[in-house]
Amino acid sequence: MRSCLLFGPHPVLFAAAWLPVFAAQGQQIAPADTTHQKVDLEEIVVSASKVEEGFLQSPVTVEKLNARALRLTPAPSFFDAIEHLKGVQVITPSLAFKVINARGFTNTTNVRFAQLVDGVDNQAPHIGGPIGNILGPSDLDIMAVEIVPGTAAALYGLNAINGLANFRTKNPFSSEGLSVQQKTGVNHVGDPYSGAKIFSETSLRYARVLVADKLALKMNGTFLRGYDWVAHDQTDINPNGNATTGLFGASNPAQDQVNRYGNESSDRRNLTLGGKSYSVARTGYDERDLVDYNLQTLKADAALHYRFRPGTELAYTYRVAGFDNVYQRSNRFRLQDYRLQQHALSLITPVVQARAYFTRENTGRSYNLRSMGENIDRSYKPDNAWYGDFATAWNAATAGGQPVPQALASARAAADAGRLQPGTTAFNQRLSQLQDVNNWDVGAALRVRASLLHAEAQANLAEALRRGGAHLPATLDLLAGADHRTYIVVPDGNYFINPNPGKDPLNDNLTYSKTGSFVQAGGRFFAEKLRLTATLRADKNDYFNLKINPRFTAVLSPTPRQNFRLSYQSGYRFPSLFEGFSNVNSGQVKRIGGLRVMSDGVFENSYLRSSIDRFNAAVTAGINGTPGQTRAQAIAASQGLLVKNPYTYIKPEHIRSLEAGYKATFGPGGRLLADVDFYYNSYRDFIAQVEAYVPVASGGGAPLPANADLNAIATALNNTNLTGPAPTQARYRLWTNSQSQVYNYGGSLGLRYELPGGYLVGANTTYTRLDRTENGDGLEDGFNTPRWACNLSLGNENAYKNFGFGLNYRWQQDYYSQTFLVNGTVPAYHTLDAQLSYSVPAPNLRFKLGASNLLNRYYVSYLGGPSVGGLYYLSATYSI
C-alpha cells in the first residue's frame, strides 16, 4: 500500500474525511440500512467449485461484485467496474472493448482467461477469447460478477489457466418488470487528435412471469454509439535502422512509428546508394488515416424459463450482437459489421446441471490496418517501381549537391509523387476497395466465419445417492462432469484453410474438437471446521495426447468468520484455432499455425529472424565501414551469426499453481472484511510466436537443401527484395512453444469496512512479479503486468436525502511490455472515478452523474494501444 499512498489518492482521502461530517451535520439523515452494515456470511458464490458455497469458505480466491457494489461503482458499466477488484488487470484496446486478466502474461487477445455468462462461454470462436462484453449482459440484467483470479482449468477445462469471470444475470421469476436506462456522455475532452465527442447508450429490459411458478420470459436490448479512443504513438521502433550512416530521428529513412502502418520490417529494403547501404522503408499511413473511429454496438437477448418444480428449471437463451470498433492482436483491426449470435439451453436441478450452446461468428467487413496501409501504398505504385524511383531521385539530388539527409527526403518526395492522400475521394475509394480484398498481400479484408458447439453436464452424485436412500453423510460431497466442444471454420482461403489430408482446402469445413471430464470428492471434518476437496480432470484434444489436471484444496475454519485456505492445481491450455491453424499472408510474411499439419517442414529449414537481423546489420556495417567491404565479402565475414530455428511444432501450455489465502470478518456484525492471498506459479511450454525465414532457390521457390553451402544460404537471407521476380527467402511467423521454464508469484490484500450511516470504505493492493526464467530464450509471451496496483474506494447509497456517491482511485506502476507490435515501458498512471446519484422512490427513478478518469489524465494501458481520457456521463434508470 505504500506505493498507493506515495502517489497521493488525495481526493479520495479528503472525501473520506469530509463526507461523514457533512452527513452528520444534516438535519434529515436517512435511517441507516442495517441490511448493508455487515458482511453477509451467507453470501453465495458458484464459480470456485461449480457448486454453491459460502463466499468466506471458498477454497480459492474469488472476487465478487454484488448488487450493492454495482450500484455504488462510479464506473460507466459493470464491466468497467471489474478493474477496481483486487488481483485483476484490465487493458483497453477500445472504448467498447476491454480485456480482463489476472496474475500476469496479459495480452490483447487473452486466451488464458475465460469469460462466462451464467456458465456459458461468450468467446468469439476464431479469436479464442471474448470481445469485451459484446455478447454479455447489460447493466440492467446483471445480478453479480464473480472473478476467479488464478487457474481454474481443473474444473472448467476452458483454457482458464489465468482465471475466469462469470457474469450472473437476473432470473425473470425473481426479477419481473420493465426497466429502461439511458446514458449520455462526452469523451475526447482536450484530446489533441479529436474534438469532444458524444457517447450514448440506451438499454431496455423486460421480464414477466407468464404462468405462475411455471413459465417466465425476459428480453434485453442495448444500443451504444460513441467515438473510439485514438491510437497515435509516433515512437520510432527502428531508430537504429541507419545507425552506420549516422542517420537518426527524422533523417532516418527506415522509421517505423508504432501507430503508422506500411513502413514495417517487410516494407523495407536495403538500397546501395553512393557506395553505401541504406535501409529505406515505404512511407505508410497513420492509424487515424485508415480507420473510422466511430463505434457502435447493437445487442439483444431473449430467454424463456420453464420451472418443472421448485429448484428444477429449463432455460433457452438467444443472444445476438452486431458491432463496429477497434481490436488488436499482433496487428490492429477495424471490426466492422461484425456479428455474433448464440443459442444456449440450460437445465438446472438439485442433482444435475447441463448446458448446450452454439455460437456463430461472422467478421463482416472488418480489415487489418497494417495490411491496409501497406497495400494502399502498393496499389498506387508497386515496391519495385517505388524503390527504383527513390534511387533515381536520390542520385539526381546528390548530383545536384544536396547533402545525404536532404537527398533522402527529396527521393522520398519524388517516389511518393501521386500517392493517395488521406481524406480524398480517391483514397476513400481505394480503402473501401481493399476492405473487400481477402488477401493480405494485396488487400486487407478479414473474412472469417466460424462456429463453436459446446455441451456439458455435471451431476451431484452425493445428493443423488442421498435422494436414492443411501446413508451418505451430509458432510461428504461427490461431483462428476463431462464436456465436449467442437470449433467449425468455413475456410476463406486467406485466414483459414482445411489442411487435413483428403480434404478440400477451400470447400471442406475445418473442425477442431476437445472432450473432457472431471470428478471431485470432498468432505467436511472436525465439526465442519476442515473442508478437504480433491479434483481430477482429463482432457483429450484433437492432435494431442490425453492431459490430466489435478486440484487439491483445503479450508480451515476455526470459526465461521475465520477461514484459511490452501490449494494446489495444474492446468493445460490447448492451442486456439488461430494458434493451431492460421494461414495468413501478411506483407510477405506468412503466419502459420504451429500444428504439423499446417507447418510441416518449415521449422526444420528456417533460420531465426533475430539472427538474420543481426547478420544483415553486420553486413551493412561491413559495407559502410572504412575501408568498406563488398557485399560478398561482408556476407562471408558475417554468416556465422545465422542461427538455425531451434523450435518445433506446437504443444499444450502447462501451469502448476500453489495458492494460500485467508478471509475473515471482524467487529460487530462483521463490518470489516479482510481477504489476503499469495500464489506461486510455474509455467512451461508457453505458446508464443517466432519469426523465421526459409532460404529458397532463386526463381524456383523451393527451399535450399539442408546441406546447401552456408554462403548460398547467407546470400539468400541477405536479399531483401521480396517482391521482385526472384525472391530468395520465404518469411514465416510461426506459433510454437518457448523453451523457457517460467516462474511468477504475487499476492493481494483487500479490506472493506462499513462505517456508521452506510458509508463503505475499501482498499486493495496487488503485487505481481515475474520471478525467474530458466533456459530463457526470450520467446515467452511478455509478462506485461505492473508489479504494483491498488484501488481505494468510498461510497454511500444514501448519504443525504436520497443522494448517494461513489469514488474510486486506481494507481498502477509502470511495467515493461513485450508484444509483436512493439516493446517498451508502459508509464505508470492513476485515475479517479466518481459518481453522484439521486434516487426518486416514486416513481422508481435513479439518476447517476459520473466520470471515469475524472481528472482527464490521458494514459495508455499497453503500448500500441489508444490514449484513454475522461468519459463524463449522466444516466437515468426507470423501473416499473
Image (cartoon, helix red, strand yellow):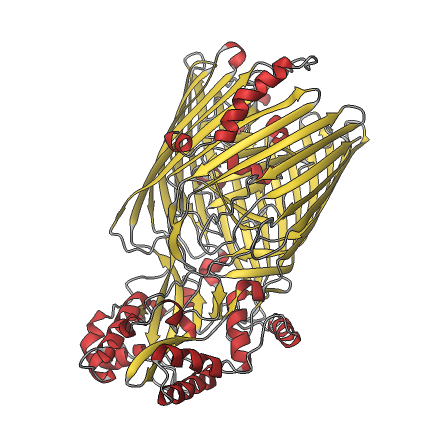
At a point 27% along the width and 78% down the height, the residue shown is 713
Viewer-side residue, 22 vs 299: 22
Viewer-side residue, 621 vs 667: 621
664 relative to 818, above or below: above
**Residue 677, image x and y in percent?**
40, 28
**Residue 144, image x and y in percent?**
60, 32
609 relative to 106, above or below: below
Instruction: Find the residue positioned furthest to the top.
Output: 668
**Residue 446, image x and y in percent?**
57, 65
**Residue 823, image x and y in percent?**
38, 56
617 relative to 232, above or below: below
Viewer-side residue, 370 vs 874: 874
Camera sees residue 481: no
At a point 49% along the width and 59% down the height, the residue shown is 578
Question: Is residue 174 found left or right of 233 in the rendered image?
Answer: right
Quarter occupied by residue 772: top left
| Number of marks in picture | 0
532 relative to 96, above or below: above
Where does the C terminus fall, quadrant-wise? top right
Camera sees residue 423: yes
Where does the N terminus fall, quadrant-wise? top left
At a point 53% along the width and 55% down the height, the residue shown is 127
